[in-house]
Structures are given as C-alpha cells and as structure tokens.
Amino acid sequence: MPATRTMNRSWGNRMVGVVLAAFFSLSCINGYAAENIRITLKPVAEVSQEVVRLTDLAELSGNRDQTKTMGNTVVASSPQPGQTRFVGGDYIRIRLRQAGFDTTRILFRGAPDVRITRTSASLPVQRIRQAVESTIRNRMPWNDENVSIKGIQFDESVRLPVGKLTYRIIPKRNEDYLGRSILALHLFVDGEAVRKLWVNATISVMTDVVVAARPLGKHQHIRLEDLTVERRDLATVGSEPITRPEDVLGNRTTRMIYPHTVIQAGMIALPPLVKRGDIVKIVADAGPMTITATGLVKQQGRKGDVVRVMNTDSKRVILARITGPGAVKVDF
C-alpha cells in the first residue's frame, strides 16, 4: 500500500511538471514575440493581389516563426487595379488584434499611414477591336466584300488585374448586323471574370437599289427612264428596297415619289390583270380531277387578289384567286 501511494505521488508530480513546463514555455514564446517583434511601416507600397498582407506594408524583425505568421496576416483589402488607398497604423493594429496578436507589446515604427497602389494592366485595345470585327464578320448574313465595320468603341481606360487576359464577345439577341450594333465584351484574368464592357460598332452593308430618277406621280406607270440604280447603305434604305429595275417596270406607283428616293415595295402596285366584265377561265382542282368553267369577273384585281366571279353556266357568284391574265382559281 505505501508503495502504491508513492508511485501515484511520483506520477502526479511528473504530470504537474509537464503542464508547468508547457505553460512557461508558451508564456516565454508569447512574451518573446510580443517584446521582440518590431514593425516598421513603409510610406508607400505596391500590391498585385486582392488582399494586402502585413509584409506588403512593413518590414518585420524579431522571432522568425512569429514574424512569418504575423507577416502573412491580411490587414486590408486591395484597391481596384490602378487605384490607390491609404491604411493607417491604428487600423493595422486593430487587424492584428483581431488576428489574435497582443499589439500592446509590439513596437511600431515608420510611417503613420501607408499609401497602397495596386498594379494593373491596360486593355489591348487594337487586339480587342480586331476580335470584335472578326466576331461580327463571322456571324453576319452579308457578303464580306459588301461590308465595312467602323466606329468600334468601348471604355479603353479600364484597368485590369495583372495576369493572363482572355475575353468573350457576345452580340445582343436578334442582332441584325445593320447600322449601330452593340456587343457585350466579357473580360477574364487568369480564368476569373473581372469586367463586362459594352462595345458599339457601326456596320455598313452596301447594296444596289432602285432609285427614282425623276418625280413620279401617284398611279403613274413606271418606265425604264424613270429609274436609276445606286449603291447605298442597306441600313439607310428602308425595310423593303427594290434591288432590280425589272421588278418595278410596268407597275404603277401608289404615291408621289420624289427624285433620288429609294423605291420601296410599298410604293408600287401591279397593274390589274382583270377588270369588271372580263371573261375568265375558272379552274378548280378536286383531288385528281381538274374542273374548268367560264366566268364573268365582277371586280378588278391584280395577281394574287381574291375577286368575285360569276359562273356563266350556273349564274352562281364565287370567290376565286387571280393566277394570270384571264385566269382564276378556286381554292378549297
């Protein structure tokens, strides 16, 4: 029994010694760090990352392990690329205390405030312009030789983080690639999206159009000498320009047309193919059979118009579509 009591007392003494040794060892380390670390703040600093660490702003001396840990502490966020911010010594003390360091026993020296500038890269303007033009030409429906692309503009003053730059150019939905166009420029640095810019471009598509060579009155029949062909920008000639004179000749105008006006489809009308009282051939397709009859037109109309026609045999008035001179067709 005494032997057992002696062994327990011995084991207990050893454990107390281990705990006290660890405590004093830790206290000595912390005390050493607090009393022997010296931080000298720089007046200016330059950073390239998103965050600012203590070693970016100051020189540290003292215990090597402790200064390494303290130096890696994030003390501020970086300004935007190409921008500047100031960080004061008091703010750095707060950040160190938040990280668990006893700043009351750390010696601070140097500048009271640090001016921090973040390094940046400029946009490769010419390369981006070439990429924008290439994107437009690859997606547009026009013949390349008829197209000129000018006025490619975007914010060239943008500063980016330093790193490998890549970008993606996306036209807006339902882009017609005529006149002023807007595209989205997505910028990536080291694979991370950093900015989105809008790019403006002016697209000119040159094409031949039919133009009035002289004044044309309303309902006037159009002759070859009334027309000329000019090369115009498709973005400026309206939605339905006529591009071939033969599509206009023999038609009539629906309105007054002034010289140098681009002829639009809505400005002309086909002359009537049938008039009231004309005798026409009525055609009706009934499955494999075709039935024909003679009819009397009750109203004038142009090709494609649906008019009233009286069957001369049955005296019944029907609706039929004009298919050509003297011919109509019944659609079932």
Image (cartoon, rainbow, N blue to C red):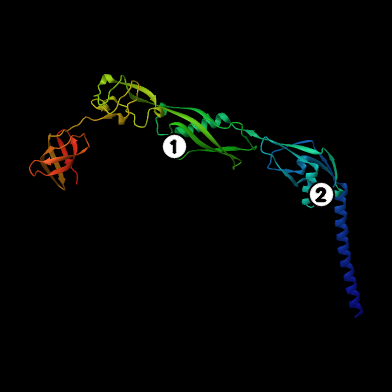
Confirm whether residue 69 shows in the render.
no
| Percent coordinates x, y for residue 54 in the rendering | 77, 43
Left or right: where does residue 282 sit relative to residue 246?
A: left
Cα separation, mark 1 vs mark 2, equals 60 Å
Q: In this view, does 201 lie above or below 4?
A: above
The residue mark sitting in front, 1 or 2, is 1
Which of the numbered marks, if any, corresponds to residue 134? none
For the residue labelled by badge 2, is the local secondary structure a helix, a strand or a loop?
helix
Q: Which amino acid does label 1 sit on?
A: Glu
Residue that badge 2 annotates: 66
Sequence order check: which comes first, mark 1 or mark 2? Answer: 2
The residue depicted at 88 percent of the width and 61 percent of the height is 21
Q: Which of 264 and 185 is in front in this view?
A: 264
| Percent coordinates x, y for residue 263 in the rendering | 32, 26
| Percent coordinates x, y for residue 19 in the rendering | 86, 63
Q: Nearer the viewer, residue 238 or 7?
A: 238
Q: What residue type is labelled 2?
A: Gln
Dot 1, how many residues are within 10 Å of its Cα: few (below 14), some (14-19), or many (20+)?
few
Left or right: where does residue 27 sit relative to residue 158?
A: right
For the residue labelled by badge 1, is the local secondary structure a helix, a strand or a loop?
loop
Dividing the picture into quadrants, the one containing residue 304 is: top left
Residue that badge 1 annotates: 175
Left or right: where does residue 137 sit relative to residue 222?
A: right
